[in-house]
Image (tube, rainbow, N blue to C red):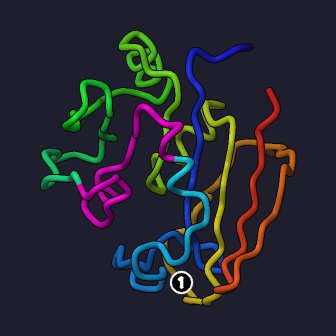
């Protein structure tokens, strides 16, 4: 099945697999994302970001820091898009991942950046993620919010590449075969 849009996860995690501490803090991640590890080039390929509310409130994965305070009061994912630049359009989205993707496809989105623990998990279980780029930070934090949660079935991945950086970051890229 060909999906109407491409959806990619680009995320940094602790070596023990956590996106954030249990209090949602990201203080174990390198300041400013650390050394350049492909994020700038990646973000240029994206026209729409779907991000969970808590991640939106805790981080600014957006170019030039163009983020305002979160307008969301629920856990529904949000949308940021460069369409209509120079400014960003931010709106609250509601619905299941397939409904969100259908709505974004109808609006002309071609490449989604999916971020936020629960949002990533829901899109992955729904079969809507085609690519995962996971950067492991060389630190163990012991507990926190895991990147992956319980799955109803195995999800096979195809390894594309693994890159290492002088700071100790290790980045692995996978595709989710259709």
Identify the residue at image location x=61%, y=80%.
Answer: 137
- The front one of 69 and 31 is 31
User: Where residue 169 sits in the image (x, y, percent)?
Assistant: 66, 78
What residue span does the magenta drawing correspond to?
43-65
Total label count? 1
Indicate yes or no whether the magenta region holds residue 19: no
User: Where residue 61 sits in the image (x, y, percent)?
Assistant: 38, 57
With 18 as the anchor, is 84 left or right in this view?
A: left
Neighbour tally class for label 1: few under 14, some 14-19, many 20 plus, Cα within 10 Å: some
With 151 as the anchor, is 7 left or right in this view?
A: left
Quarter of the image holding residue 170? Answer: bottom right
With 37 as the anchor, is 97 left or right in this view?
A: left
The relative height of residue 31 versus residue 33 in the rendered view (above or below) is: below
Q: Which residue is mark 1?
A: 143
Identify the residue at image location x=43%, y=31%.
Answer: 47
Indicate yes or no whether the magenta region holds residue 53: yes
Quarter of the image holding residue 96? Answer: top left
Identify the residue at image location x=40%, y=39%.
Answer: 50
- The front one of 33 and 44 is 44
User: Where residue 18 sits in the image (x, y, percent)?
Assistant: 56, 73
- The front one of 25 and 167 is 167
Identify the residue at image location x=47%, y=85%.
Answer: 28
User: Where residue 7 sits in the image (x, y, percent)?
Assistant: 57, 34
Quarter of the image holding residue 49? Answer: top left
Dot 1 falls on a residue whose secondary structure is: loop
């Amino acid at each position: 099945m060909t999906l109407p849009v491409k959806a990619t996860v680009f995320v940094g995690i602790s070596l023990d697999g956590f996106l954030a501490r249990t209090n949602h803090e990201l203080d174990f991640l390198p300041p400013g994302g650390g050394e350049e590890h492909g994020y700038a080039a990646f973000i240029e390929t994206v026209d729409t970001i779907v991000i969970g509310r808590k991640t939106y409130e805790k981080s600014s994965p957006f170019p030039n820091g163009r983020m305002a305070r979160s307008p969301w009061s629920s856990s529904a994912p949000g949308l940021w898009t460069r369409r209509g630049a120079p400014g960003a359009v931010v709106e609250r989205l509601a619905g299941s991942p397939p409904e969100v993707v259908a709505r974004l496809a109808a609006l002309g989105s071609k490449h989604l950046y999916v971020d936020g623990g629960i949002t990533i998990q829901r899109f992955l279980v729904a079969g809507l993620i085609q690519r995962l780029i996971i950067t492991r930070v060389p630190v163990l934090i012991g507990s926190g919010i895991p990147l992956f949660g319980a799955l109803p079935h195995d999800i096979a991945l195809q390894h594309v590449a693994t890159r290492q950086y002088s700071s100790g970051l290790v980045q692995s890229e996978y595709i989710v075969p259709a």
